[in-house]
Image (spheres, rainbow, N blue to C red):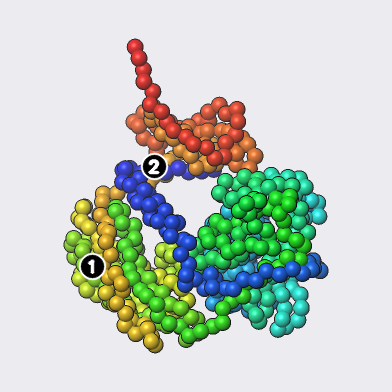
Amino acid sequence: MDHFYFRSTIENLKQLLAKLHFLIFLFLIFPNHTHAIVGNYTFASSSGTYTALAGGTTLVSGTTWDDQVSTLLTIPFSFTYNNVAYTTLGINANGFITLGAVSTSGFYCGLQTSAANSIAGYGTDLVGATATSTIKYGVIGTAPNRKYVIQWTECKHWNGAATDSYTFQIVLNETSNTVQVVWGPVTSASTMGANACADTATESGSVGLLGNSNLDFNLRSITNGAVSGNTWAASIAGTAINAVGNMSPTNIPASGLTYTWTPPVPVSMAFTSCTTTFVNTAQGVARSAVNNAVIRVQVVVTGTTSPFSVSNLALSTTGCTSPTNDLTNAKVFFTGGSNIFATTTQFGSTVVGPNGAFSVTGSATLSEGTNYFWVTYDTKATATFGDLLKGCCTQITGSGTMGVRTPTVTCPTGSQTIVDEGVWTKVTATAPHANHGVMLLLSDGTVMCHTNSGGADGHGNLWDKLTPDATGSYINGTWTTTAPMIDTRLFFSSQVLKMDVYM
Protein backbone atom coordinates (compact mmCIF):
# COMPACT_ATOMS: atom_id res chain seq x y z
CA MET A 1 0.00 0.00 0.00
CA ASP A 2 1.24 3.48 -0.83
CA HIS A 3 0.96 6.71 1.15
CA PHE A 4 0.98 9.99 -0.78
CA TYR A 5 2.22 13.41 0.20
CA PHE A 6 1.40 16.90 -1.10
CA ARG A 7 3.57 20.00 -0.84
CA SER A 8 2.02 23.26 0.28
CA THR A 9 3.92 25.57 -2.12
CA ILE A 10 5.10 25.62 -5.74
CA GLU A 11 8.70 26.09 -4.57
CA ASN A 12 9.21 22.33 -4.47
CA LEU A 13 8.76 22.10 -8.23
CA LYS A 14 11.39 24.79 -8.76
CA GLN A 15 13.85 22.91 -6.61
CA LEU A 16 13.20 19.64 -8.40
CA LEU A 17 13.87 21.31 -11.74
CA ALA A 18 17.11 22.80 -10.47
CA LYS A 19 18.25 19.40 -9.19
CA LEU A 20 17.31 17.80 -12.50
CA HIS A 21 19.42 20.34 -14.37
CA PHE A 22 22.35 19.51 -12.12
CA LEU A 23 21.94 15.76 -12.69
CA ILE A 24 21.74 16.31 -16.45
CA PHE A 25 24.98 18.28 -16.23
CA LEU A 26 26.69 15.36 -14.46
CA PHE A 27 25.33 12.95 -17.05
CA LEU A 28 26.69 14.99 -19.95
CA ILE A 29 30.24 15.06 -18.59
CA PHE A 30 30.61 11.34 -17.82
CA PRO A 31 32.77 10.43 -20.88
CA ASN A 32 35.73 12.29 -19.29
CA HIS A 33 37.52 9.67 -17.21
CA THR A 34 41.18 10.49 -17.90
CA HIS A 35 42.28 9.99 -14.31
CA ALA A 36 39.96 7.11 -13.43
CA ILE A 37 41.85 4.13 -12.01
CA VAL A 38 39.41 1.58 -13.47
CA GLY A 39 39.71 3.45 -16.76
CA ASN A 40 43.47 2.86 -16.55
CA TYR A 41 43.22 -0.93 -16.42
CA THR A 42 44.73 -2.49 -19.55
CA PHE A 43 42.61 -4.79 -21.70
CA ALA A 44 43.44 -7.95 -23.63
CA SER A 45 41.29 -10.34 -25.66
CA SER A 46 42.23 -13.98 -26.21
CA SER A 47 40.71 -17.29 -27.30
CA GLY A 48 40.80 -20.45 -25.25
CA THR A 49 38.68 -23.26 -23.86
CA TYR A 50 35.65 -22.67 -21.67
CA THR A 51 35.67 -24.77 -18.48
CA ALA A 52 32.44 -24.92 -16.54
CA LEU A 53 32.63 -24.53 -12.78
CA ALA A 54 32.68 -27.95 -11.12
CA GLY A 55 30.64 -27.99 -7.94
CA GLY A 56 30.21 -24.56 -6.44
CA THR A 57 27.07 -23.07 -4.90
CA THR A 58 23.89 -22.51 -6.90
CA LEU A 59 22.27 -19.13 -6.41
CA VAL A 60 19.24 -19.68 -8.70
CA SER A 61 18.17 -22.26 -11.26
CA GLY A 62 15.49 -23.01 -13.85
CA THR A 63 13.38 -20.60 -15.88
CA THR A 64 11.71 -18.71 -13.02
CA TRP A 65 14.59 -16.54 -11.78
CA ASP A 66 14.37 -12.86 -12.60
CA ASP A 67 16.04 -9.87 -10.88
CA GLN A 68 17.35 -11.89 -7.92
CA VAL A 69 20.29 -10.66 -5.86
CA SER A 70 22.48 -12.66 -3.51
CA THR A 71 23.31 -11.92 0.06
CA LEU A 72 26.77 -10.47 0.72
CA LEU A 73 29.14 -13.32 -0.13
CA THR A 74 32.67 -13.92 1.19
CA ILE A 75 35.63 -14.05 -1.20
CA PRO A 76 38.15 -16.51 0.35
CA PHE A 77 41.07 -14.22 -0.48
CA SER A 78 41.68 -10.48 -0.61
CA PHE A 79 40.96 -9.08 -4.06
CA THR A 80 42.14 -5.55 -4.83
CA TYR A 81 39.89 -3.61 -7.20
CA ASN A 82 40.05 0.11 -7.88
CA ASN A 83 42.78 0.41 -5.19
CA VAL A 84 40.60 -1.14 -2.48
CA ALA A 85 41.05 -4.63 -1.03
CA TYR A 86 37.73 -6.52 -0.96
CA THR A 87 36.76 -9.78 0.74
CA THR A 88 33.03 -9.67 -0.09
CA LEU A 89 30.79 -9.22 -3.13
CA GLY A 90 27.17 -9.39 -4.19
CA ILE A 91 25.77 -11.10 -7.28
CA ASN A 92 22.99 -9.51 -9.32
CA ALA A 93 21.18 -12.03 -11.54
CA ASN A 94 21.25 -9.48 -14.35
CA GLY A 95 24.80 -10.31 -15.36
CA PHE A 96 27.02 -8.39 -12.94
CA ILE A 97 28.64 -8.41 -9.51
CA THR A 98 29.40 -5.62 -7.03
CA LEU A 99 32.52 -5.62 -4.86
CA GLY A 100 31.87 -5.04 -1.17
CA ALA A 101 28.10 -4.61 -1.54
CA VAL A 102 24.90 -6.06 -2.94
CA SER A 103 23.54 -4.00 -5.83
CA THR A 104 19.76 -3.66 -5.79
CA SER A 105 19.80 -1.41 -8.87
CA GLY A 106 20.85 -1.85 -12.48
CA PHE A 107 18.23 -4.48 -13.20
CA TYR A 108 17.66 -3.40 -16.80
CA CYS A 109 20.51 -1.00 -17.57
CA GLY A 110 23.60 -2.98 -16.59
CA LEU A 111 26.45 -0.78 -15.38
CA GLN A 112 24.63 2.42 -16.40
CA THR A 113 22.69 2.38 -13.13
CA SER A 114 24.38 -0.28 -11.01
CA ALA A 115 26.15 0.36 -7.72
CA ALA A 116 29.74 1.62 -7.76
CA ASN A 117 32.59 -0.87 -8.20
CA SER A 118 30.55 -3.35 -10.23
CA ILE A 119 31.83 -5.77 -12.89
CA ALA A 120 29.60 -6.96 -15.76
CA GLY A 121 29.90 -10.15 -17.76
CA TYR A 122 26.74 -9.25 -19.68
CA GLY A 123 24.79 -6.70 -17.67
CA THR A 124 21.18 -6.41 -18.79
CA ASP A 125 17.79 -7.88 -17.81
CA LEU A 126 18.61 -11.60 -17.79
CA VAL A 127 16.37 -14.59 -17.01
CA GLY A 128 16.76 -18.34 -17.11
CA ALA A 129 16.36 -19.71 -20.66
CA THR A 130 16.02 -23.43 -19.91
CA ALA A 131 15.20 -25.84 -17.12
CA THR A 132 18.95 -26.31 -16.58
CA SER A 133 19.74 -22.58 -16.38
CA THR A 134 21.75 -21.64 -13.30
CA ILE A 135 23.79 -18.94 -11.62
CA LYS A 136 26.60 -20.49 -9.57
CA TYR A 137 29.70 -19.32 -7.75
CA GLY A 138 32.76 -21.01 -6.29
CA VAL A 139 36.55 -21.13 -5.95
CA ILE A 140 39.01 -23.12 -8.01
CA GLY A 141 42.80 -23.55 -7.71
CA THR A 142 45.13 -23.21 -4.76
CA ALA A 143 46.64 -20.21 -2.98
CA PRO A 144 48.16 -17.87 -4.02
CA ASN A 145 46.60 -18.39 -7.48
CA ARG A 146 42.97 -19.10 -6.71
CA LYS A 147 40.10 -17.96 -8.90
CA TYR A 148 36.69 -16.85 -7.66
CA VAL A 149 34.23 -17.74 -10.42
CA ILE A 150 30.67 -16.45 -10.86
CA GLN A 151 28.94 -18.34 -13.67
CA TRP A 152 25.73 -17.74 -15.66
CA THR A 153 24.61 -20.83 -17.59
CA GLU A 154 21.98 -20.77 -20.35
CA CYS A 155 20.36 -17.40 -19.69
CA LYS A 156 18.76 -14.91 -22.08
CA HIS A 157 17.23 -11.45 -22.11
CA TRP A 158 13.79 -11.14 -20.56
CA ASN A 159 11.21 -11.65 -23.34
CA GLY A 160 14.02 -12.61 -25.76
CA ALA A 161 13.76 -15.36 -28.36
CA ALA A 162 13.14 -18.81 -26.91
CA THR A 163 16.30 -20.18 -28.52
CA ASP A 164 18.61 -17.47 -27.18
CA SER A 165 21.15 -18.83 -24.70
CA TYR A 166 24.16 -17.12 -23.09
CA THR A 167 26.76 -18.81 -20.90
CA PHE A 168 29.59 -16.78 -19.36
CA GLN A 169 31.76 -16.36 -16.27
CA ILE A 170 33.20 -13.46 -14.29
CA VAL A 171 36.56 -14.53 -12.83
CA LEU A 172 38.49 -12.72 -10.07
CA ASN A 173 42.15 -13.81 -9.93
CA GLU A 174 44.07 -13.90 -6.66
CA THR A 175 47.44 -12.10 -6.41
CA SER A 176 47.34 -10.60 -9.95
CA ASN A 177 43.98 -8.93 -9.18
CA THR A 178 43.01 -9.29 -12.83
CA VAL A 179 39.36 -9.48 -13.87
CA GLN A 180 38.20 -11.82 -16.62
CA VAL A 181 35.00 -12.44 -18.52
CA VAL A 182 35.03 -15.88 -20.13
CA TRP A 183 32.37 -16.95 -22.62
CA GLY A 184 30.88 -20.41 -22.94
CA PRO A 185 28.43 -21.65 -25.59
CA VAL A 186 26.19 -18.88 -26.97
CA THR A 187 23.30 -18.89 -29.43
CA SER A 188 21.33 -15.81 -30.46
CA ALA A 189 18.26 -15.77 -32.65
CA SER A 190 17.71 -12.15 -31.58
CA THR A 191 19.51 -9.15 -33.01
CA MET A 192 20.43 -7.04 -30.00
CA GLY A 193 20.84 -3.24 -30.05
CA ALA A 194 21.46 -0.30 -27.74
CA ASN A 195 20.43 -0.36 -24.08
CA ALA A 196 18.17 2.65 -23.47
CA CYS A 197 16.98 1.32 -20.07
CA ALA A 198 13.51 0.71 -21.51
CA ASP A 199 13.74 -3.06 -20.85
CA THR A 200 12.90 -4.07 -24.40
CA ALA A 201 13.81 -7.61 -25.43
CA THR A 202 16.70 -6.50 -27.65
CA GLU A 203 18.66 -4.36 -25.18
CA SER A 204 22.27 -5.53 -25.09
CA GLY A 205 24.40 -5.96 -21.97
CA SER A 206 27.33 -4.07 -20.47
CA VAL A 207 30.68 -5.87 -20.59
CA GLY A 208 33.44 -4.53 -18.36
CA LEU A 209 34.30 -2.54 -15.26
CA LEU A 210 32.75 0.32 -13.27
CA GLY A 211 34.67 2.30 -10.63
CA ASN A 212 33.48 4.72 -7.96
CA SER A 213 31.04 6.50 -10.29
CA ASN A 214 29.85 6.51 -13.89
CA LEU A 215 32.81 8.77 -14.70
CA ASP A 216 35.07 5.78 -14.08
CA PHE A 217 34.55 2.84 -16.46
CA ASN A 218 36.36 0.41 -18.74
CA LEU A 219 33.85 -1.17 -21.10
CA ARG A 220 33.92 -3.08 -24.38
CA SER A 221 31.77 -2.12 -27.35
CA ILE A 222 30.54 -4.59 -29.98
CA THR A 223 28.21 -3.26 -32.69
CA ASN A 224 26.22 -5.27 -35.23
CA GLY A 225 26.35 -4.17 -38.85
CA ALA A 226 28.22 -4.95 -42.03
CA VAL A 227 29.57 -1.40 -42.46
CA SER A 228 30.34 -0.02 -39.03
CA GLY A 229 30.02 -3.15 -36.91
CA ASN A 230 32.72 -5.14 -35.19
CA THR A 231 32.91 -8.67 -33.85
CA TRP A 232 33.30 -9.96 -30.31
CA ALA A 233 36.84 -11.07 -31.12
CA ALA A 234 37.59 -7.50 -32.29
CA SER A 235 35.76 -5.48 -29.62
CA ILE A 236 36.67 -1.83 -29.14
CA ALA A 237 36.87 0.35 -26.03
CA GLY A 238 33.52 1.83 -25.02
CA THR A 239 33.68 5.62 -24.85
CA ALA A 240 30.51 6.09 -22.77
CA ILE A 241 28.86 4.35 -19.83
CA ASN A 242 26.07 3.08 -22.12
CA ALA A 243 28.51 1.10 -24.32
CA VAL A 244 27.25 -2.46 -24.79
CA GLY A 245 27.97 -5.71 -26.60
CA ASN A 246 25.49 -6.34 -29.43
CA MET A 247 24.68 -9.87 -30.52
CA SER A 248 22.99 -11.29 -33.61
CA PRO A 249 22.66 -14.74 -35.19
CA THR A 250 25.99 -14.10 -36.95
CA ASN A 251 27.76 -12.02 -34.27
CA ILE A 252 28.24 -13.88 -31.00
CA PRO A 253 31.23 -14.54 -28.73
CA ALA A 254 32.98 -17.82 -29.48
CA SER A 255 33.15 -20.36 -26.68
CA GLY A 256 36.39 -19.74 -24.80
CA LEU A 257 36.64 -16.05 -25.75
CA THR A 258 38.31 -14.37 -22.76
CA TYR A 259 38.46 -10.67 -21.91
CA THR A 260 41.10 -9.73 -19.32
CA TRP A 261 41.47 -6.42 -17.47
CA THR A 262 44.78 -5.87 -15.64
CA PRO A 263 45.30 -3.12 -13.04
CA PRO A 264 48.15 -0.67 -13.67
CA VAL A 265 51.51 -1.02 -11.95
CA PRO A 266 51.40 1.07 -8.75
CA VAL A 267 53.29 4.39 -8.81
CA SER A 268 53.73 7.12 -6.21
CA MET A 269 50.88 9.59 -5.88
CA ALA A 270 51.32 12.96 -7.60
CA PHE A 271 49.15 16.08 -7.48
CA THR A 272 47.44 17.06 -10.75
CA SER A 273 44.90 19.82 -10.06
CA CYS A 274 42.17 21.16 -7.79
CA THR A 275 39.18 23.42 -8.28
CA THR A 276 35.79 24.31 -6.81
CA THR A 277 32.33 24.26 -8.37
CA PHE A 278 28.99 25.55 -7.13
CA VAL A 279 26.31 22.88 -6.65
CA ASN A 280 22.54 23.14 -6.89
CA THR A 281 22.77 26.66 -8.28
CA ALA A 282 19.47 28.58 -8.37
CA GLN A 283 18.03 26.16 -5.83
CA GLY A 284 15.71 27.43 -3.13
CA VAL A 285 16.84 26.63 0.42
CA ALA A 286 14.43 26.46 3.32
CA ARG A 287 14.87 27.93 6.77
CA SER A 288 16.29 25.39 9.25
CA ALA A 289 17.89 23.40 6.42
CA VAL A 290 20.59 20.97 7.54
CA ASN A 291 23.65 19.91 5.51
CA ASN A 292 22.67 21.92 2.46
CA ALA A 293 25.53 21.44 -0.05
CA VAL A 294 26.83 24.72 -1.50
CA ILE A 295 30.24 24.13 -3.10
CA ARG A 296 32.18 21.04 -4.18
CA VAL A 297 35.98 20.96 -3.94
CA GLN A 298 37.68 18.59 -6.37
CA VAL A 299 41.25 17.31 -5.95
CA VAL A 300 42.75 15.27 -8.79
CA VAL A 301 45.78 13.03 -8.22
CA THR A 302 47.54 10.19 -10.04
CA GLY A 303 49.27 7.15 -8.58
CA THR A 304 48.39 4.94 -5.67
CA THR A 305 51.40 4.41 -3.40
CA SER A 306 52.26 6.86 -0.59
CA PRO A 307 48.81 8.48 -0.87
CA PHE A 308 48.32 12.10 0.12
CA SER A 309 46.25 13.08 3.13
CA VAL A 310 44.35 16.38 3.02
CA SER A 311 44.54 18.12 6.40
CA ASN A 312 42.95 21.55 5.87
CA LEU A 313 40.54 23.49 3.69
CA ALA A 314 40.59 27.30 3.81
CA LEU A 315 37.04 28.49 3.15
CA SER A 316 34.89 31.60 3.28
CA THR A 317 31.28 32.74 3.09
CA THR A 318 32.16 35.42 0.53
CA GLY A 319 29.10 36.29 -1.56
CA CYS A 320 26.53 35.36 1.09
CA THR A 321 24.07 38.18 1.73
CA SER A 322 24.17 37.96 5.53
CA PRO A 323 25.98 34.96 7.06
CA THR A 324 25.34 36.12 10.64
CA ASN A 325 21.58 36.35 10.04
CA ASP A 326 21.23 33.23 7.87
CA LEU A 327 23.78 30.55 8.87
CA THR A 328 24.18 28.47 12.00
CA ASN A 329 26.82 25.92 10.93
CA ALA A 330 29.25 25.10 8.14
CA LYS A 331 30.51 21.55 7.59
CA VAL A 332 32.71 19.66 5.13
CA PHE A 333 31.97 16.14 3.93
CA PHE A 334 34.32 13.83 2.01
CA THR A 335 32.95 11.29 -0.51
CA GLY A 336 36.26 10.02 -1.90
CA GLY A 337 36.00 9.21 -5.61
CA SER A 338 32.20 9.46 -5.68
CA ASN A 339 30.73 12.59 -7.24
CA ILE A 340 27.43 11.97 -5.44
CA PHE A 341 26.92 14.09 -2.33
CA ALA A 342 26.60 12.15 0.93
CA THR A 343 26.91 12.98 4.62
CA THR A 344 28.45 9.65 5.60
CA THR A 345 31.95 10.98 6.30
CA GLN A 346 32.40 14.42 7.85
CA PHE A 347 35.81 16.03 7.38
CA GLY A 348 36.92 17.90 10.49
CA SER A 349 34.59 19.59 12.95
CA THR A 350 31.50 21.72 12.48
CA VAL A 351 32.17 25.47 12.29
CA VAL A 352 29.54 27.30 14.32
CA GLY A 353 28.35 30.67 13.02
CA PRO A 354 30.57 30.96 9.90
CA ASN A 355 31.11 34.56 8.81
CA GLY A 356 33.85 35.49 6.36
CA ALA A 357 37.07 33.42 6.24
CA PHE A 358 37.22 30.17 8.21
CA SER A 359 39.10 26.89 7.96
CA VAL A 360 38.33 23.23 8.61
CA THR A 361 41.05 20.85 9.79
CA GLY A 362 40.64 17.11 9.41
CA SER A 363 42.14 14.05 7.71
CA ALA A 364 41.11 12.48 4.40
CA THR A 365 43.25 10.06 2.40
CA LEU A 366 43.06 10.61 -1.35
CA SER A 367 42.64 7.92 -4.01
CA GLU A 368 43.84 8.04 -7.59
CA GLY A 369 41.51 10.08 -9.77
CA THR A 370 39.15 12.84 -8.65
CA ASN A 371 38.37 13.21 -4.95
CA TYR A 372 35.40 15.22 -3.69
CA PHE A 373 34.89 17.47 -0.67
CA TRP A 374 31.54 19.20 -0.10
CA VAL A 375 30.94 22.40 1.89
CA THR A 376 27.48 22.62 3.46
CA TYR A 377 25.53 25.23 5.43
CA ASP A 378 22.82 24.85 8.05
CA THR A 379 20.35 27.75 7.88
CA LYS A 380 18.67 29.51 10.78
CA ALA A 381 14.96 29.27 11.51
CA THR A 382 14.94 33.07 11.24
CA ALA A 383 16.95 33.31 7.99
CA THR A 384 15.86 36.14 5.71
CA PHE A 385 13.83 35.16 2.67
CA GLY A 386 15.56 36.17 -0.57
CA ASP A 387 19.09 36.20 0.88
CA LEU A 388 21.76 34.49 -1.22
CA LEU A 389 24.10 31.64 -0.21
CA LYS A 390 27.55 31.36 -1.81
CA GLY A 391 31.01 30.15 -0.80
CA CYS A 392 34.72 29.93 -1.62
CA CYS A 393 37.69 27.59 -1.12
CA THR A 394 40.97 29.51 -1.25
CA GLN A 395 43.52 26.85 -0.24
CA ILE A 396 43.86 23.09 0.21
CA THR A 397 46.65 21.61 2.34
CA GLY A 398 47.88 18.06 1.79
CA SER A 399 50.76 15.88 2.91
CA GLY A 400 54.00 15.18 1.06
CA THR A 401 54.65 16.85 -2.26
CA MET A 402 51.06 18.00 -2.51
CA GLY A 403 51.69 20.75 0.02
CA VAL A 404 49.50 23.86 -0.07
CA ARG A 405 47.49 24.31 -3.27
CA THR A 406 45.26 27.09 -4.56
CA PRO A 407 42.23 25.87 -6.53
CA THR A 408 41.99 26.93 -10.17
CA VAL A 409 38.60 28.42 -9.29
CA THR A 410 38.32 29.65 -5.71
CA CYS A 411 34.91 31.39 -5.69
CA PRO A 412 32.69 29.64 -8.25
CA THR A 413 29.76 31.37 -9.90
CA GLY A 414 26.26 30.46 -8.79
CA SER A 415 24.06 31.02 -5.77
CA GLN A 416 21.18 29.60 -3.79
CA THR A 417 18.25 31.57 -2.39
CA ILE A 418 16.56 31.23 0.98
CA VAL A 419 12.85 30.65 0.28
CA ASP A 420 9.59 30.14 2.12
CA GLU A 421 9.27 26.41 1.60
CA GLY A 422 6.24 24.31 2.39
CA VAL A 423 6.11 21.03 4.27
CA TRP A 424 4.98 17.53 3.34
CA THR A 425 1.89 16.10 5.03
CA LYS A 426 0.79 12.50 4.67
CA VAL A 427 -2.79 11.99 3.54
CA THR A 428 -4.97 10.21 6.08
CA ALA A 429 -6.34 7.41 3.90
CA THR A 430 -4.16 4.70 2.36
CA ALA A 431 -4.32 4.23 -1.43
CA PRO A 432 -6.08 1.04 -2.56
CA HIS A 433 -3.13 -0.07 -4.72
CA ALA A 434 0.65 0.41 -4.97
CA ASN A 435 1.41 3.42 -7.14
CA HIS A 436 3.70 3.20 -10.17
CA GLY A 437 4.93 6.79 -10.20
CA VAL A 438 2.51 8.72 -12.44
CA MET A 439 0.19 11.26 -10.78
CA LEU A 440 -1.98 13.65 -12.79
CA LEU A 441 -3.82 16.66 -11.35
CA LEU A 442 -7.11 16.90 -13.22
CA SER A 443 -8.97 20.11 -13.95
CA ASP A 444 -11.66 19.28 -11.36
CA GLY A 445 -9.05 19.08 -8.58
CA THR A 446 -8.93 15.29 -8.30
CA VAL A 447 -5.66 13.41 -8.66
CA MET A 448 -5.28 10.32 -10.86
CA CYS A 449 -2.55 7.87 -9.79
CA HIS A 450 -1.38 5.07 -12.07
CA THR A 451 -0.89 1.79 -10.19
CA ASN A 452 1.13 -1.32 -10.90
CA SER A 453 -1.94 -3.48 -10.31
CA GLY A 454 -4.06 -5.22 -12.91
CA GLY A 455 -1.22 -6.53 -15.07
CA ALA A 456 1.97 -8.59 -15.02
CA ASP A 457 5.44 -7.27 -14.01
CA GLY A 458 4.11 -3.89 -12.92
CA HIS A 459 2.30 -3.23 -16.23
CA GLY A 460 -0.80 -1.89 -14.49
CA ASN A 461 -4.19 -1.09 -16.03
CA LEU A 462 -5.76 0.38 -12.89
CA TRP A 463 -5.83 4.02 -11.76
CA ASP A 464 -6.71 5.24 -8.26
CA LYS A 465 -8.33 8.65 -7.85
CA LEU A 466 -7.91 10.93 -4.82
CA THR A 467 -10.82 13.35 -4.35
CA PRO A 468 -10.36 16.23 -1.88
CA ASP A 469 -12.90 16.71 0.89
CA ALA A 470 -15.54 19.46 0.96
CA THR A 471 -12.98 22.00 2.17
CA GLY A 472 -10.58 21.16 -0.68
CA SER A 473 -8.16 19.26 1.56
CA TYR A 474 -6.29 16.33 0.02
CA ILE A 475 -5.14 15.28 3.48
CA ASN A 476 -8.66 14.12 4.33
CA GLY A 477 -9.52 13.14 0.77
CA THR A 478 -11.16 9.94 -0.43
CA TRP A 479 -9.63 7.23 -2.62
CA THR A 480 -11.58 5.39 -5.34
CA THR A 481 -10.50 3.12 -8.17
CA THR A 482 -11.52 3.96 -11.73
CA ALA A 483 -12.66 1.44 -14.33
CA PRO A 484 -9.66 -0.52 -15.68
CA MET A 485 -8.05 0.39 -18.99
CA ILE A 486 -8.32 -2.09 -21.83
CA ASP A 487 -4.51 -2.31 -22.11
CA THR A 488 -1.83 -2.29 -19.43
CA ARG A 489 0.81 0.43 -19.33
CA LEU A 490 4.40 0.55 -18.02
CA PHE A 491 6.09 3.45 -19.86
CA PHE A 492 4.00 6.10 -21.60
CA SER A 493 3.64 9.82 -22.12
CA SER A 494 0.80 11.65 -20.41
CA GLN A 495 -0.71 15.11 -20.37
CA VAL A 496 -3.82 16.70 -18.89
CA LEU A 497 -5.54 18.77 -21.59
CA LYS A 498 -7.62 21.86 -20.96
CA MET A 499 -11.32 21.31 -21.60
CA ASP A 500 -13.26 24.14 -23.19
CA VAL A 501 -17.03 24.25 -22.71
CA TYR A 502 -19.15 26.00 -25.30
CA MET A 503 -22.74 27.00 -24.62
Residue occupying image coordinates x 40% and y 56%: 25
What element does badge 2 sit on?
Answer: strand
User: Where does the image place residue 20, in percent across and percent down from the top left?
Assistant: 40, 51
User: Which amino acid type is shown beneath numbered disc 2?
Assistant: Phe
Q: Residue furthest front?
A: 227
Residue occupying image coordinates x 71% and y 47%: 190
252 vs 455, left or right, is right
Residue occupying image coordinates x 65% and y 80%: 176
Residue occupying image coordinates x 43% and y 60%: 29
User: Where does the image place residue 6, in percent across and percent down from the top left?
Assistant: 39, 42
Cα distance in 3D space between marks 2 and 1: 34 Å
| Residue 428 vs residue 302, the one in the foreground | 302
The residue identified by callout 2 is 6
255 vs 17, left or right, is right
Please tell me whether residue 363 is drawn above or below residue 167 in the rendered image.
below
139 vs 194, left or right, is right
Disc sitting over residue 424 in the figure:
none
User: Where does the image place residue 83, in percent across and percent down from the top left?
Assistant: 54, 77
User: Which amino acid type is shown beneath numbered disc 1?
Assistant: Thr
Q: Quadrant of residue 363?
A: bottom left
337 vs 181, left or right, is left
Q: Nearer the viewer, mark 2 or mark 1?
A: 1
| Residue 165 vs residue 132, the one in the foreground | 165
User: Where does the image place residue 256, in percent across and percent down from the top left?
Assistant: 76, 66
The residue identified by callout 1 is 317
| Residue 336 vs residue 247, the one in the foreground | 247
Q: Pointers 2 and 1 in contact (CB under 8 A)?
A: no
Q: Can the viewer see residue 335?
A: yes
What element does badge 1 sit on?
Answer: loop
The crowding category of the residue bearing disc 1, from other C-alpha atoms within 10 Å (few below 14, some 14 to 19, many at least 20), is: many
The crowding category of the residue bearing disc 2, from other C-alpha atoms within 10 Å (few below 14, some 14 to 19, many at least 20), is: few
